[in-house]
Image (cartoon, grey):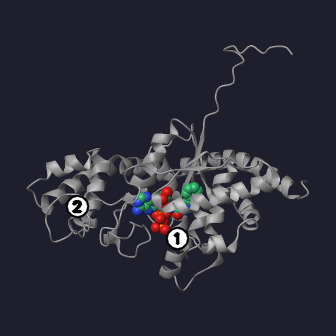
């Protein structure tokens, strides 16, 4: 057999690994979303082929006001640009503009067991907080999430720690499908950043900070004004002990230290040294100032992108076109394997 000589001309560049992640337009994103997920997306987008979506299909698992949903979807799309994702390098799109997500989710529903879905903690939590609307979509939400990931053959999925269980289900579904039909999907790995992976509520630091929390004092929105940020952090729940150090039973202080660490890059030891002998008052002002500076450029760029609605629509169409092309390729492969007649 003739030996193939690899030269700089015929060498195949090593395939860049792929990442995919999504954020729901279920409210204005919080500091938790930013530090736990979005900040990592921008960092990773230069080393990986990235696809990032506004998960509007996921958002309707909880009742949404149509006007607000549309507005928030545009805002979250503009936010993805504001955090520094480049539409020339990454695919940025609205999930509902790519029908393959719903189509693959239906197929994967038939390869997912009721029992394994019943163990999902997010479903249990949300069933409690939305007891009047425990719909089937809320239950099968992780299957749609698996479809999002598997359509793009993502190697890595950057998410906050709360999504780990959903990632495991996506891997299980992919392995099961591959086991029946031969290799179809890449098995994705979660990417959970070291710091900021779980930012807690400012009012109840045993609960994660959530944009759909009914109490706005519990979260910092990425669009809060400096005055609002200062006020919310000053009224954050701490403890009666008074010392700035990381420890058991000090969830409120631990949370503020972790936020401060994410914004400044300081370690816990450095923070403890900085605030030795000082009270929570000084510490909270420093945390608030660090958060204000962290979010300032995001807010400024967001205002810039929201002004040009025509350009926003244009970028959404461009993102959807590329996403549809990639997603349809995987969907067709799946449909052939399952046995559908392809037109
Ligand atoms: P909701 O609160 O409306 O249920 P959410 O904010 O939990 O929504 P998404 O909008 O889908 O959910 O989250 C987008 C990303 O932000 C996910 O990767 C999620 O893991 C991450 N994230 C959400 N909340 C936090 C938090 N408190 N700390 C760290 N990361 C978070
Ligand atoms: N379920 C996620 C949002 C989400 C997602 C995804 C994240 C929807 N589809 C695909 C990563 C990959 C959440 O609630 N945080």
| Residue 124 image offset from top left, x and y in percent | 53, 76
| Residue 239 image offset from top left, x and y in percent | 19, 70
Label 2 sits on a secondary structure element that is: helix
Q: Is residue 283 above or below residue 311?
A: below
Disc nearer the start of the sequence (1/2) = 1
* Quadrant housing residue 165: bottom right
Write the residue at 61% across / 65% down.
142
How far apart in space, not on screen, are marks 1 and 2 (Cα)?
A: 30 Å
Q: Is residue 211 left or right of residue 239?
A: right
Camera-nearest residue between 259 and 82: 259
Q: Is residue 297 left or right of residue 86?
A: left
Q: Is residue 152 visible?
A: yes
The outermost residue toward the left is 277
Q: Is residue 210 above or below residue 309?
A: below
Q: Is residue 73 visible?
A: no
Camera-nearest residue between 60 and 300: 60
Judging by the rendered image, the residue that carries numbered circle 1 is 122
Write the residue at 71% across / 67% down.
112
| Residue 247 image offset from top left, x and y in percent | 24, 61
Label 1 sits on a secondary structure element that is: helix
| Residue 228 image offset from top left, x and y in percent | 27, 63
Write the residue at 22% across / 53% down.
289
Q: Is residue 114 left or right of residue 87?
A: right
Camera-nearest residue between 160 and 46: 160
Camera-nearest residue between 117 and 17: 117
Dot 1, how many residues are within 10 Å of its Cα: few (below 14), some (14-19), or many (20+)? some
Judging by the rendered image, the residue that carries numbered circle 2 is 230
* Viewer-nearest of discs 1 and 2: 1
Write the residue at 41% across / 55% down.
197
């Amino acid at each position: 057999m003739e030996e193939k000589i690899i030269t700089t001309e015929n060498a195949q560049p090593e395939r860049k690994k792929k990442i995919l992640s999504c954020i729901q337009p279920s409210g204005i994103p919080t500091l938790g979303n930013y530090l736990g997920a979005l900040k990592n997306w921008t960092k990773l987008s230069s080393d990986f082929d990235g696809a990032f979506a506004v998960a509007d299909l996921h958002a309707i698992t909880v009742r949404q006001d149509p006007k607000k949903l549309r507005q928030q979807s545009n805002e979250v799309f503009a936010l993805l640009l504001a955090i520094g994702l480049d539409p020339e390098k990454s695919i940025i799109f609205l999930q509902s503009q790519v029908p393959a997500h719903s189509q693959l989710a239906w197929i994967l529903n038939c390869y997912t067991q009721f029992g394994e879905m019943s163990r999902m903690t997010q479903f249990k939590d949300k069933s409690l907080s939305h007891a009047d609307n425990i719909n089937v979509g809320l239950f099968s939400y992780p299957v749609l999430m698996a479809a999002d990931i598997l359509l793009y053959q993502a190697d890595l999925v950057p998410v906050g720690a709360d999504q780990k269980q959903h990632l495991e289900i996506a891997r299980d579904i992919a392995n099961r499908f591959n086991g029946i039909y031969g290799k179809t999907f890449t098995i994705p790995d979660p990417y959970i950043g070291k710091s900021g992976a779980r930012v807690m509520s400012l009012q109840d630091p045993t609960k994660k900070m959530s944009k759909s929390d009914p109490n706005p004092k519990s979260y910092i929105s990425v669009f809060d004004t400096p005055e609002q940020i200062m006020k919310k952090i000053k009224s954050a729940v701490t403890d009666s002990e008074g010392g700035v150090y990381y420890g058991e039973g000090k969830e409120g202080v631990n949370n503020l230290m972790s936020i401060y660490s994410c914004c400044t890059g300081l370690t816990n030891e450095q923070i403890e040294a900085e605030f030795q002998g000082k009270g929570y008052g000084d510490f909270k002002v420093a945390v608030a100032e660090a958060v204000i500076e962290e979010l300032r450029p995001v807010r400024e760029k967001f205002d810039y992108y929201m002004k040009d609605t025509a350009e926003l629509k244009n970028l959404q169409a461009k993102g959807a076109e590329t996403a549809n092309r990639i997603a349809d390729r995987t969907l067709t492969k799946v449909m052939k394997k399952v046995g559908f007649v392809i037109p």
